[in-house]
């Protein structure tokens, strides 16, 4: 009996010695651990925030840690770094304020080397002589803790807005020459960035913006008013991508969930930027107007009107919900 009591006391002492990390917030109602899609597959993520998560997020300083990579037709494969406040460094790059400027923002667990960037940098440079600036916020997005990365996307977006303001002040560029493109967490972050720009950004494209943690997030999630024209392409809606409309125009290719030629959610998520890339170089992707996102997801759309998905130029003044079908392999467009 004495031995059993001793073992119980030892067990209690061991439990008491474990660090206490209280939960302070839940992203969503439901299980604490949920599957979330990352660039390298599905991860079982803790979606409840603890004190240590908040401490980790507080260590992220986007003004100091975000890195901006400039690509132009003069340097299409090797980037030139840009730093907020460094006018001297800016002056020796190929940046031209008279060109359209594209800002690319990756998602969770990604970086400058993301497939998202590998697809879209050459596509934009092929479509037009533009400045393409890739935002590497991997210092904030790289945490395996989804809550931390999601939380970091807000100050990162604010910092991207400050970067654009500095660039405009230093060069005379204007917000109407900007196109912000974000994927996954970056799909919401581009809206946050645009809200912090002095003036109205011309064009936002959100590629399968994240679902988890954003459904009740009315303050920071993407809004149609964030730019002169805001477009969303849904390719994994209701699983890891946001299901409901967020932009002026929302496209649900193939119903927005399961993409032809894909056998995983990872592939479905990636299709959004492959479709965007092809829309820049080949055109096509004509959507049929729908009454609601429900009819867009079922393909039961017969309202008058069509609209081209993607492309280089904002379709300012257009709005609505659209459905279209794609091929299972490139060229994806049937138009």
Image (spheres, helix red, strand yellow):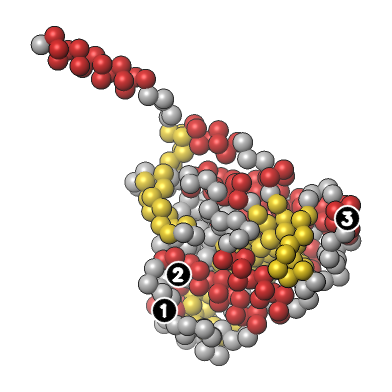
Among the 4 quarters of the image, the one containing residue 106: bottom right
Name the one closer to the observer, 285 or 45. 45
Quadrant the N terminus occupies: top left
Q: Answer whether residue 113 is visible to the viewer in this image.
A: yes
Q: Residue at x 56, y 66 (%)?
A: 115
Q: Residues within 10 Å of mark 1 (few under 14, many from 20)?
A: few
Q: Determine the secondary structure under disc 2.
A: helix
Residue at the disc numbered 3: 170
Q: Residue at x 46, y 59 (%)?
A: 40
Disc nearer the start of the sequence (1/3) = 3
Q: Residues within 10 Å of mark 2 (few under 14, many from 20)?
A: some
Name the one closer to the observer, 28 or 273. 273
Q: Residue at x 82, y 56 (%)?
A: 167
Residue at the disc numbered 1: 261
The CA span between labels 1 and 2 is 9 Å
Q: Which mark is residue 11?
A: none
Q: Residue at x 72, y 55 (%)?
A: 68
Q: Determine the secondary structure under disc 3.
A: helix
Name the one closer to the observer, 20 or 308. 20
Verify CB contact (< 8 Å) between mark 3 and mark 2. no
Q: Is residue 21 above or below residue 318?
A: above
Residue at the disc numbered 2: 267
Verify CB contact (< 8 Å) between mark 1 and mark 2. yes
Residue 285 horizontal side relative to residue 126, left or right: left
How many numbered discs sit on the rendered protein?
Answer: 3
Residue 210 horizontal side relative to residue 98, left or right: left
């Amino acid at each position: 009996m004495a031995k059993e009591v001793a073992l119980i006391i030892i067990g209690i002492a061991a439990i008491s010695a474990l660090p206490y990390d209280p939960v302070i917030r839940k992203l969503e109602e439901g299980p604490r651990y949920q599957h979330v899609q990352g660039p390298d597959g599905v991860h079982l993520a803790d979606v409840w925030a603890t004190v240590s998560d908040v401490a980790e997020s507080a260590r992220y300083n986007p003004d100091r840690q975000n890195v901006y990579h400039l690509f132009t037709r003069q340097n299409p494969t090797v980037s030139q770094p840009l730093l907020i406040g460094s006018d001297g460094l800016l002056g020796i790059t190929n940046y031209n304020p008279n060109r359209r400027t594209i800002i690319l923002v990756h998602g969770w667990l990604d970086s400058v080397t993301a497939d998202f960037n590998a697809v879209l940098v050459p596509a934009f440079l092929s479509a037009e002589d533009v400045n393409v600036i890739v935002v590497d916020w991997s210092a904030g997005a790289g945490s395996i803790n989804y809550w931390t990365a999601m939380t970091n996307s807000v100050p990162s977006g604010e910092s991207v807005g400050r970067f654009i303001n500095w660039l405009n002040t230093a060069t005379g560029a204007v917000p109407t020459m900007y196109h912000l493109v974000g994927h996954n967490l970056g799909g919401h972050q581009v809206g946050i960035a645009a809200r912090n720009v002095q003036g109205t950004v011309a064009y936002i494209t959100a590629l399968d913006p994240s679902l988890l943690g954003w459904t009740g997030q009315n303050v920071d999630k993407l809004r149609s008013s964030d730019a002169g024209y805001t477009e969303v392409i849904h390719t994994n809606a209701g699983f890891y991508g946001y299901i409901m409309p967020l932009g002026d125009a929302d496209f649900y290719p193939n119903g927005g969930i399961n993409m032809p030629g894909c056998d995983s959610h990872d592939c479905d998520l990636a299709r959004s930027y492959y479709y965007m890339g092809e829309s820049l170089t080949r055109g096509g992707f004509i959507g049929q107007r729908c009454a609601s996102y429900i009819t867009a997801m079922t393909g039961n759309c017969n309202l008058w009107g069509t609209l081209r998905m993607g492309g280089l130029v904002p379709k300012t003044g257009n709005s609505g919900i659209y459905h279209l079908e794609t091929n299972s392999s490139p060229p994806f467009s049937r138009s």
